[in-house]
Amino acid sequence: MQTKVFWLAGIIVFLLLITVPGTSRGISVPDVITLHSQSKLYEPFNFPHAKHILLLKECSYCHHHTTGTLMKNPDCIRCHINSSETKVVSCRGCHLPDPFTAAAMKEKDPKLYHNDRPSLKAAMHRNCIDCHDKMKGPTGCRDCHKYTKEGASFYNTGEFAPKNKPAKGGHGEH
Amino acid sequence: MKRRDFLKGCLISGAAVSLGTPSKSWAVGSFEGYPDSMGVLVDTTRCIGCRSCEAACNKEQKLPEPDVPFDDTSVFEEKRRTSEKAYTVVNRYEATDGQKPPFRKMQCNHCNEPACLTSCFVNAYTKTKEGAVIYNSKVCVGCRTCMVACPFNIPAYSYSSAFGPVIKKCIFCYHTRLKFGKPPACVEICPREALTFGLRRDLIKLANERIRATPDKYYDHIYGEKELGGTSWLYLSRVPAEQIGLDETVGNEPIISNVKEFLGMVPMVLTIWPALFTGIHLLATRGKDHDDAHSNHSEQEDGKK
């Protein structure tokens, strides 16, 4: 009898595992994601994933057709009307960090969709800033990014700010 | 054939050759750009005015230190233009319909038929097959005609250099990047991919696709696709191009078309005209001159006698 119950429980758990998506089970959904692809110029930035899940309660706002409710964009549902959630849901699974290399550009077929897929950096900055604009979130560069020393020198700012101001004003002191 | 008929024929055919306007195709064939020319699509709807492209350009081209930091947004209070210290600048334009004010990056548009190249009499400019309009300071004599010729007001002059001033302008990062198939520094740093690098012909398809997919986001025009014979850098915007400081009165004809016909005639005028008119002159005055000289001579002789 006990073995029967054990088996039944095992089958139910197994069925749950294969039918309920990982995201709903709370498996491998990171609370904080450290973004460091631009670590040369900026300090790594901790993206509060959990906070955004609680706020939006809809994964597809960022994850498109890979997880969450199906997008209603008519351009997407032409193909993705029956799409199920995908294995890869991370941004970098689809968005290339370096979209303009000769190899990456050769892969683009002008006859196919997803040709205009933004790079990893662009995907984040466009999705984040456009949404923050609507939701009145922070949108300034410095709101998320802190310069590294190299970054400050690159932008001639902070300790690397130009010392000799031009004789003619106009650009203004701050 | 009578002499009078011959002269008439000469005059008529000469006039036809010299006055008849040759067709454009006869003068110089029009050039549509190199087939594998690269380009950059500037989608101004994506630009947020972060000025990262300006910083990247400054470092890549080893330009002098800027007047203010590259993250200082006070520069948007005035309209700037490209200079010897900045090959690219971002300007902010007026919001017209309660939307956010649009930004536009400006730099050399790398025309298919560049007016700077046409105007340069020492051939300091080259349009490379990759699409870049590059400049050789070694042959430049500093006449600055290219600055006058450029319809976009791009070339700048290093007035600050007393010895050996040269023209300064965006060269599409040709020597350090484009030549090796890499995108220019501004494209690489742009955080929102307002700048897309690719084959020019692909970028036109891409731009049309963006307009098709999101028609309410774009004004239905790709600036640079046809303007002045086409440019390697193309612009998309939410508002008509003139509202982001792009000149829509430039027309679709390359600047060189204005002088092509005239310049096509120059060799003909220089070679045929002298021979033709000398011949006509000699024929028209043959005998007459001789007779006059002879009679003068004889008159003088008579006088002496």
Image: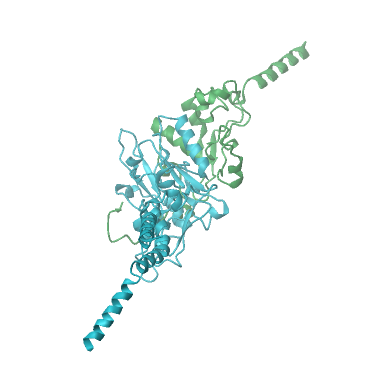
Q: Residue furthest top?
A: A1
Please state, as top left, top right, bottom left or bottom right, where the C terminus of chain B lies in the image: bottom left
In the displayed structure, does residue B101 sit left or right of residue A147? Answer: left
Who's the residue at 50% across and 37% down the image? B206
Q: Work out whether residue A155 or residue A36 is closer to the camera in this orientation and state it.
A: A155
User: Horizontal and vertical percent for residue A99?
Assistant: 56, 43
User: Horizontal and vertical percent for residue B153?
Assistant: 35, 53
Who's the residue at 24% across and 82% down the image? B299
Residue B261 seen: yes
Q: How is the image coloured?
A: by chain
Q: Kindly indicate which chain is depicted in green in the rendered structure.
A: A
Among the 4 quarters of the image, the one containing residue B294: bottom left
User: Horizontal and vertical percent for residue A93?
Assistant: 60, 36
Q: Work out whether residue B195 or residue A57 is closer to the camera in this orientation and state it.
A: B195
Who's the residue at 46% across and 63% down the image? B136
In the displayed structure, does residue B2 sit left or right of residue A29? Answer: left
Residue A157 seen: no
Who's the residue at 33% across and 51% down the image? B80
Q: Work out whether residue B284 or residue A44 is closer to the camera in this orientation and state it.
A: B284
From this view, report whether residue B29 is shown above or below residue B135.
Answer: above
